[in-house]
Image (spheres, rainbow, N blue to C red):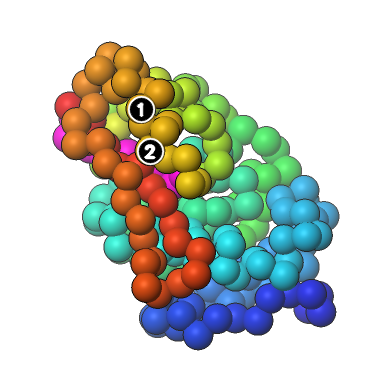
């Protein structure tokens, strides 16, 4: 295990519950192989738990049992992390790059995640038109660009749950035309983990009408 890997925070046990051991294994695998696969840089190891694993799992309570897509899954953040925390949800990890698809497939198999299907391709090409209950993405693109990419994949009254940074509110404001065009309702910036973690997670949630 790399010496620079951040120690597991106590809050991980609270957030993952019975799935903690699987989360620990995934984090270890990512620490060892992440740079090799081009998934994370060496500077991420000292904050791998707090900035990436905990940051992702905070979204888990927002998900409902059903079919959830994750656009641009990359290292499995948040897709694999959420699949670990929510075995009652069926996840479709959508990723265009071959080496990252290989990583996602390997991890889903090694970790015994029977609720994960990995699909290679762009969001526009995977054939999920109107078929997902919810869809998430992390560090993929601006909200205005994500809307036309993601909204068509979600069923009527389905939901976008998009992870964002500190500029989330400004992204919502800049996306007003796309919000109207794709008939999004209840668009809201939510802060997750307040009072629980130092680095909170921000998401934009929106209902697709």
Front-lying residue, 19 or 149:
149
152 is higher (above) or lower (below) than 134: above
The residue depicted at 50 percent of the width and 30 percent of the height is 142
Magenta stretch bounds: 156-164
Find disc 1 in the rendering and name its residue. Answer: 173
Q: Residues within 10 Å of mark 1 (few under 14, many from 20)?
A: few
The residue depicted at 28 percent of the width and 14 percent of the height is 181
Magenta region, mostly helix, strand or loop?
strand
| Spatial CA span between label 2 and label 1 | 6 Å
Q: Which mark is residue 93?
A: none
Q: Is residue 40 left or right of residue 53?
A: right
Q: Is residue 117 visible?
A: no
178 is higher (above) or lower (below) than 82: above
Q: Is residue 148 left or right of residue 119?
A: left
Q: Residues within 10 Å of mark 2 (few under 14, many from 20)?
A: some
Residue 49 drawn at (x, y percent): 60, 70
Contact check, label 2 and label 1, Cβ < 8 Å: yes
Residue 177 drawn at (x, y percent): 32, 15
SS at circle 1? helix
Find disc 2 in the rendering and name its residue. Answer: 169
Callout count? 2
Q: Residue 50: which quarter of the image?
A: bottom right
In the rendered image, the quadrant that contains the N terminus is: bottom right
Front-lying residue, 54 or 37:
54
The residue depicted at 30 percent of the width and 63 percent of the height is 61
Assess whether residue 161 is covered by the magenta stretch: yes
The residue depicted at 29 percent of the width and 55 percent of the height is 63
SS at circle 2? helix
Assess whether residue 189 is covered by the magenta stretch: no
Q: Is residue 147 left or right of residue 63?
A: right
């Amino acid at each position: 295990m790399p010496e620079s890997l951040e120690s597991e925070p106590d809050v991980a046990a609270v957030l993952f519950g019975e799935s903690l051991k699987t989360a620990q294994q995934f984090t270890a695998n990512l620490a060892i192989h992440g740079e090799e696969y081009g998934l994370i840089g060496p500077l991420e190891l000292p904050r791998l738990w707090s900035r990436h694993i905990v940051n992702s799992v905070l979204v888990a309570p927002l998900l409902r049992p059903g079919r959830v897509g994750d656009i641009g899954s990359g290292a499995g953040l948040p897709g694999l992390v959420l699949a670990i925390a929510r075995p009652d949800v069926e996840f479709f990890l959508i990723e265009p790059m071959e080496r990252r698809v290989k990583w996602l497939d390997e991890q889903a198999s090694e970790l015994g995640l029977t609720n994960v299907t990995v699909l290679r391709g762009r969001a526009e090409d995977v054939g999920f038109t109107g078929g997902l209950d919810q869809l998430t993405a992390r560090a993929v693109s601006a909200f205005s660009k994500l809307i036309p990419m993601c909204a068509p994949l979600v069923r009527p009254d389905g939901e976008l749950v998009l992870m964002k940074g500190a500029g989330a509110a400004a992204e919502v404001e800049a996306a007003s035309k796309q919000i109207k065009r794709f008939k999004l309702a209840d668009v809201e910036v939510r802060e997750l983990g307040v009072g629980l973690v130092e680095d909170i997670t921000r998401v934009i949630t929106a209902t697709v009408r």
